[in-house]
Image (cartoon, rainbow, N blue to C red):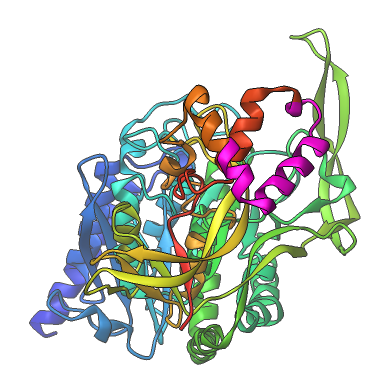
């Protein structure tokens, strides 16, 4: 026996002992954050096929880690680009909600199993041990009131009390900026985010959210629905963990059918979809024993990585073809709604639901009777149709003054061309005509729940250092999704441009009265529109102030900046 082989055996003997001691999910326990990182360091030290690296800060003050696994030997000094070459890349994210800890434990078990039995060829696996470190450190026994175990677990909010699964566009958390770096370095073909469900009761331990097919690039949508998903459901069934699409009902029972979850770009898999990465969210059932939830998640990780290895070349081709197709597309959808006319039949294994007199309140309570299981065919609505589609310009013009926006574009790998001098351009500008903010904060923002705009062609002066953002690049879907003002998770909706909603200049009625009289005498078109407005708005026409405001608003004195969306569309 040579020295290397002898050392390798000692390492694995130690690793096996450590394995038995520190994975405690069979006893309804999950590891602390410190124990998780210690376990990954142990993996790093145990094998040349595993490397643990740090990537950027988080709001907790702790760095974000990633473990890389490959059938090829990895060295600390290697370029990650070389690790990726000709491989399908799978990025697994754990603990975005640390109270939902199934994936944290399952990923350690998966990595150890791989290093003992062999890592599949043709894949590079990257695992984020714990994404929401602040939430993991905020450990207790009660924050998941509806969940059966583990005994102690982390908290949903991060160190700033942000839900990180709503932060992928606004990027308030340092965690998100570090995730950007990891994601764009890897450009993964498949992304998995591990969770535990809320909602109804049923027989399944594992449910799954796949990237919503109708907002995924068509090339990838076909690959997902025709090849990948059928194999995932079949393989999980064969392993003793039959799986169902995420049961998207709250306060109702699923036996009447339910709809697929629409993960817009604020969510992890909604964000990764913008870069032609197929995303999966595992949702282990909250009421099943913790041991079962971890082992079902572990099985899913094994199945998805085996499928990625089996279809490695197909995945590489599909993503490349999707990228090429995006460069040719002239339009993109930016908002969707459920198509209630389309559904497919799905076998569903549930429990009989009944409404009983509450022993706590004066009303009825929903109760699932586990002694009465059933299997029935239900309707599953998994088709979404676009409610808004935009023509894509050659460029967006992004003023540098709102500096947070160009910063986030750069974090996301967007190529931008700074103007070398002050420049006047003829552009398409959007003006907000109707809007509504949430009246309470949502994830630290007063989100714009409604935005309507109208388009005007204008000559506008842009300053040296403002940016032309070409749309013919890999980040095309992301660019359109954040810069189109009416997109469901645009930067405008997330309050990056709130300054435009406040008017800065006004008029004094007694002074402007003379100006208004002169404007009506000089401008027949304005006079006609003023009379039409008074006829259409008889109540407002009784108000002298409202009448003067109409004239002011339609005069050269009214500020162009009010309600004008700063980002413009430009085509040469």
Question: Is residue 538 part of the magenta span, yes or no?
Answer: yes
Seen from this angle, which residue lies furthest left? Answer: 3
- Which is the main secondary structure of the residues drawn in magenta? helix
Q: Nearer the viewer, residue 259 or 339?
A: 339
Query: Where is residue 446 drawn, in percent x and y?
Result: 50, 35
Query: Where is residue 351 drawn, in percent x and y?
Result: 83, 41
User: In the rendered view, does 322 fall on the left or right side of 67?
Assistant: right
The region drawn magenta spans 517-541
User: In the rendered view, does 267 fall on the left or right side of 433?
Assistant: left
User: In the rendered view, does 350 fall on the left or right side of 145?
Assistant: right
Q: Which part of the image, by quadrant, shows the N terminus?
A: bottom left
Answer with the quarter of the image where residue 370 lies.
top right
Q: Is residue 448 above or below residue 123?
A: above
Q: Nearer the viewer, residue 474 or 499?
A: 499
Query: Where is residue 498 drawn, in percent x and y?
Result: 44, 41
Q: Nearer the viewer, residue 247 or 440?
A: 440
Q: Is residue 370 above or below residue 277?
A: above
Answer with the quarter of the image where residue 3 lies.
bottom left
Identify the residue at image location x=55%, y=79%: 307
- Would you say residue 353 is visible in this rendering? yes
């Amino acid at each position: 026996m040579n020295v290397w082989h002898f050392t390798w055996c000692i390492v694995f003997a130690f690793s096996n002992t450590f394995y038995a001691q520190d994975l405690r999910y069979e006893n309804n326990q999950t590891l602390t954050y410190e124990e998780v990182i210690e376990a990954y360091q142990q993996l790093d030290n145990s094998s040349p096929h595993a490397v643990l690296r740090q990537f950027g800060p988080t709001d907790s003050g702790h760095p974000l880690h990633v473990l890389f696994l490959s059938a090829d030997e990895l060295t600390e000094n290697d370029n990650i680009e070389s690790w990726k070459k000709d491989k399908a890349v799978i990025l697994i994210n754990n603990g975005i909600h640390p109270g939902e800890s199934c994936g944290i434990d399952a990923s350690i078990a998966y990595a150890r199993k791989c290093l003992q039995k062999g890592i599949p060829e043709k894949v590079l696996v990257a695992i984020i041990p714990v994404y929401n470190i602040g939430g993991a450190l905020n450990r207790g026994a009660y924050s998941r009131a509806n969940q059966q175990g583990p005994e102690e677990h982390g908290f949903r909010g991060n160190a700033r009390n942000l839900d990180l699964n709503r932060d992928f566009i606004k990027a308030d958390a340092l965690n998100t900026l570090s995730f950007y770096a990891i994601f764009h370095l890897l450009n993964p073909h498949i992304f998995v985010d591990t969770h535990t469900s809320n909602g109804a009761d049923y027989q399944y331990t594992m449910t799954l959210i796949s990237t919503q097919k109708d907002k995924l690039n068509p090339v990838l949508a076909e690959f997902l629905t025709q090849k990948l998903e059928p194999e995932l459901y079949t393989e999980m069934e064969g392993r003793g963990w039959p799986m169902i699409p995420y049961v998207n009902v709250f306060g109702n029972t699923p036996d009447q059918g339910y709809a697929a979850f629409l993960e817009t770009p604020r969510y992890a898999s909604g964000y990764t979809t913008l870069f032609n990465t197929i995303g999966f969210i595992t949702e282990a059932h909250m009421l099943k024993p913790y041991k079962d939830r971890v082992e079902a998640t572990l099985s899913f990780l094994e199945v998805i990585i085996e499928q990625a290895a089996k279809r490695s070349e197909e995945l590489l081709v599909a993503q490349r073809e999707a990228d090429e197709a995006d460069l040719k597309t002239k339009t993109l959808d930016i908002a969707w709604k459920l198509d209630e006319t389309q559904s497919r039949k799905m076998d569903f294994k549930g429990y009989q639901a009944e409404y009983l007199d509450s022993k706590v309140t004066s009303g009825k309570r929903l109760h699932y009777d586990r002694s009465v299981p059933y299997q029935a065919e239900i309707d599953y609505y998994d088709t979404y149709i676009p409610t808004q589609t935009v023509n894509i310009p050659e460029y967006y013009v992004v003023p540098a003054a709102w500096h947070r926006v160009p910063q986030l574009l750069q974090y996301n790998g967007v190529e931008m061309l700074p103007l070398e001098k002050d420049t006047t351009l003829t552009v398409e500008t959007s003006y907000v005509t109707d809007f509504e903010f949430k009246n309470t904060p949502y994830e630290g923002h007063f989100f714009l729940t409604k935005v309507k705009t109208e388009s005007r062609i204008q000559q506008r002066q842009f300053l040296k250092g403002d940016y032309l953002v070409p749309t013919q690049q890999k980040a095309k879907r992301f660019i359109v999704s954040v810069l189109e003002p009416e997109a469901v998770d645009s930067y405008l909706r997330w309050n990056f441009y709130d300054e435009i909603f406040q008017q800065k200049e006004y008029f004094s009625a007694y002074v402007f009265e003379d100006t208004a009289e002169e404007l009506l005498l000089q401008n027949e078109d304005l006079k006609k529109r003023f009379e039409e407005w008074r006829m259409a708005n008889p109540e407002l026409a009784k108000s002298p102030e409202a009448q003067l405001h109409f004239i002011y608003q339609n005069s050269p004195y009214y500020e162009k900046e009010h309600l004008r969306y700063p980002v413009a569309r430009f085509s040469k």
